[in-house]
Image (spheres, grey):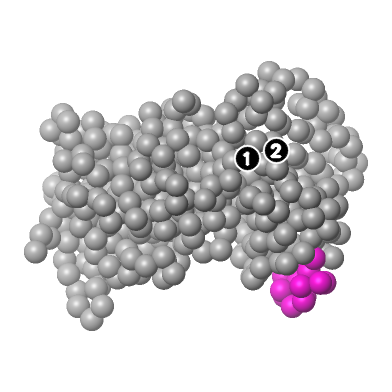
Amino acid sequence: MNDTYDVLIVGGGLVGASLAIALDGSGLSVALAEAAAPRVDLQPSYDERNLALARASLNALEALGVLDARSPATPIRRIHVSRRGDFGAVRLDHGELGLPAFGAVMPARELGNALLRRLDACTSLARLAPAQAIAIAIEAGADAVSVRLRLGDAEREVRARLLVGADGTESFVRSAFGIGAERHDYAQSAFVTTLTTERPLDGTAYERFTDSGPVALLPLGERRAGLVLSVPAEEAPRVASLDDEAFLAFVHERFGWRAGRFSRPGKRKPYPLARLLAERTTAPRTVLVGNAAQTVHPLGAQGFNLGLRDALTLAELLREAQAAATDPGAADLLARHVERRAGDRHATTSFSDDLVRLMGNDVLPLRLARSLGFHVLDRFPPLKRRFALRGMGWRGDVSTLGLMR
């Protein structure tokens, strides 16, 4: 049994699985340590959320062979952004801006299914599951990281020239290296569910801001829609206890009636919302990606898209290193990854955080400024196009897999 790999990915969620797939066929020996057995109903990140995939993410997932006819993705052709109590709105239409669809909406569980099918087809991947990292060690100047894994009742020592922490917000890899993290509790909880709309959304995604938090409505085809409803944390227990009829009335109170009457809400539970930024994303022969590196507010649907861009950039650098027969865990490779990701990481996390604070403030001067901003952005196509392109994932140093085509 092989106990030494070029790359060990700890974390088999959406980002970790995507990285493993992106490295398939690279010539590198890769192992993926998954906390749960590889069944979609056991993966903690393959839940009932509906993901808004940016165009760059769709491009990459299609190029990697993840998305196919069995992958139900609903195109986002229009975006409508507004705030209750402010005048004006921002309306983006892909046809008017000369852009392909802005992205697509896909249930996280279905993306998980697609990733698992593609992982099954990988020819050079060792899958260790269920496996939990319990200890990490590296000696100064060593050419590999040593990771102790718990696999059921047994333990196993694995060595890797590069360790990738893709193990989520409460990352063991991050804490094992003593990497601190800046945390901010938004004092909000998000309810994630689906519902049926009286009128078809027809490819329109809505983002509606209110004093109590944002509400997003995402198209899922036919008249089904994904809902993300944020509420103050202290209200979450009350909202969770509402029956279907009362819950739908609450949603209408917050969102309005643009899509007609809502019906048939799905299962729902609150998720606490917080922001986390790792103080650094590398350690000796180690790199953090996805939520282990940064966890953002779901506003703007940037979390998975940002993490996927981490993975794609890393895969690109590792493939280049393999082609040049250089060390995949070399300090200069990790430094290049930090440099290439810095602009996108800073801009995206800052934008998400600033937007939450800006849209949640109800003072009159700010309301007037927001309304003026909506008015200006909505009436200048070049500005709208630039805004749309950034939201589509074409920001900073983009991996070739995600480029426009």
In the figure, residue 365 lies in which quadrant? Answer: top right
Q: Identify the residue at horizontal 30%, vertical 54% (top origin).
A: 119
| Above or below, 62 relative to 93 | below
Residue range in magenta is 234-248
Q: Where does the image place residue 200, in percent across and percent down from the top left?
A: 74, 48
Q: Amino acid at mark 1?
A: Ile
Closest to the camera, between mark 2 and mark 1, is 1
Magenta residues, dominant SS class? helix
Residue 178 visible in the displayed image: no
- Element type at mark 2: strand
Q: Residues within 10 Å of mark 1 (few under 14, many from 20)?
A: many
Residue 253 visible in the displayed image: yes
Q: Amino acid at mark 2?
A: Ile
Total numbered circles: 2
In the figure, residue 309 lies in which quadrant? Answer: top left
Front residue (pair 225, 294):
225
Q: Where does the image place residue 96, in percent across and percent down from the top left?
A: 70, 23
Front residue (pair 88, 352):
88
For the residues marked 2 and 1, what is the alpha-carbon distance in whole angstroms?
7 Å
- Element type at mark 1: strand
| 392 relative to 34 in the view: left or right | right
Asked whether the beta carbons under mark 2 and mark 1 sit within 8 Å of each other, the answer is yes
Q: Identify the residue at horizontal 23%, vertical 31% (top origin).
A: 320
Residue at the far bottom in the pictured view:
153
| Above or below, 392 relative to 376 | below
In the figure, residue 310 lies in which quadrant? Answer: top left
* Disc 2 target residue: 79
The quarter of the picture where the N terminus appears is: bottom left
Q: Residues within 10 Å of mark 2 (few under 14, many from 20)?
A: some
